[in-house]
Image (spheres, rainbow, N blue to C red):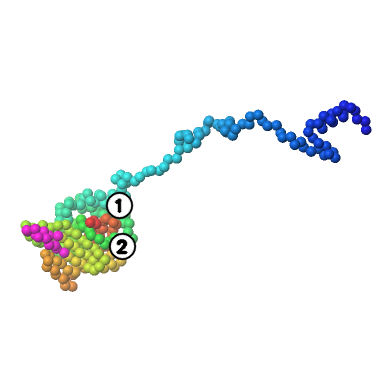
Amino acid sequence: MNVSKRQLAALGALLSGGAAVSAFHIAPSAVAPPRLAHAPSSSALGMADYDDSYPSDSSEDTHFTVEKDESTIDVENKPSTASESVVSSIMDYLPSSLASSGDLSAEDRAAINEAILKLEALNPTDDPAYSPLINGVWNLKYAGGYSDSKIPSPTRDLALFLYSGGYSPGLFALSLAQKLPAQLVELGDLEISISRQQPRIEAKIDVTLFGGSEDKVEVKARLEVDSGLRFTETYESATVLGQTIDLPDALQYSRDLYVSYVDEDILVVRDGAGVPEILVRK
């Protein structure tokens, strides 16, 4: 093979570039690659990639602001429930005292009855006769009555009294207290306590006698649960100014009592004739 001088010179120049030939194998040169004079820093690269169309982490833009829910319940301005609205409307019509219930007009009584019906439809308590909410100290605020008859009858009131099973213990205590001479006694509020032990009902009126001494008129009654809605209420004894009388069986009035509404503050009951009574927890 004829090799020209020019080809030999080119091969020599190639070998002189740092590669070694050994049995036709070319090894890479150990010479390090050239270094860049000025390598760009990572911060420089970050700034180069920065797009000012997006806010930074320290931006106050609302797109990146997370607001905490610091809302609180304003009790005074809290919307009232349906039952609270009905109770409020009932209270607006009730007299200042139970003794003045007879002064209510027919229109006021009708408005109270309508409000009671609305409240009963909202009763939150299942089987209220079994509920512990029945127990407690109550003030009797309203006792419904019968409408006046267009034809006067001397036996009508007695017939209605016997049909309904008699007065409630609270009204019985009130009627006893009102028989005391008004010029010698001052009557307090009627208070009804319902407990778990028999006799469960205690209706009491504090009495301040002439001269400042204090006493009470008190009526006690048993309360038997007949169903989730119905009680049987039976008089047991009466105490007037320290004189206690245990009622004989013949005089122990008994009546059915239906619980139509009860919650933490209000108790509504009806007698066998459907006459309502409203009690407010003390």
Q: Which sits earlier in the primary sequence, circle 2 or circle 1?
A: 1
From the image, tell me which residue sits under label 2: 131
- Residue type at mark 1: give it: Ser
- Tell which tag, 2 or 1, sits nearer the viewer: 2
User: Badge 2, how many Cα within 10 Å: few under 14, some, many 20+?
Assistant: few
Question: Which image quarter is the C terminus in?
Answer: bottom left
Residue lying farthest bottom? 249
Taking the view exactly as shown, the residue that stands out farthest to the right is 1
Q: Examine the image and state in which quarter residue 148 appears.
A: bottom left
174 left or right of 129 in image: left
Image quadrant where residue 225 sits:
bottom left
Label 1: which residue? 83
Q: Position of residue 246 (x, y in %)?
A: 16, 71
Q: Secondary structure at mark 2?
A: loop
The magenta region covers 206-218
Q: Which mark is residue 129?
A: none
Query: Is residue 77 visible in this depiction of the protein?
Result: yes
Closer-to-camera residue (156/8): 8
**Quarter that holds the N terminus:** top right
Q: Residue 168 occupies which quadrant of the picture?
A: bottom left
The Cα–Cα distance between marks 2 and 1, rounded to whole angstroms, is 19 Å
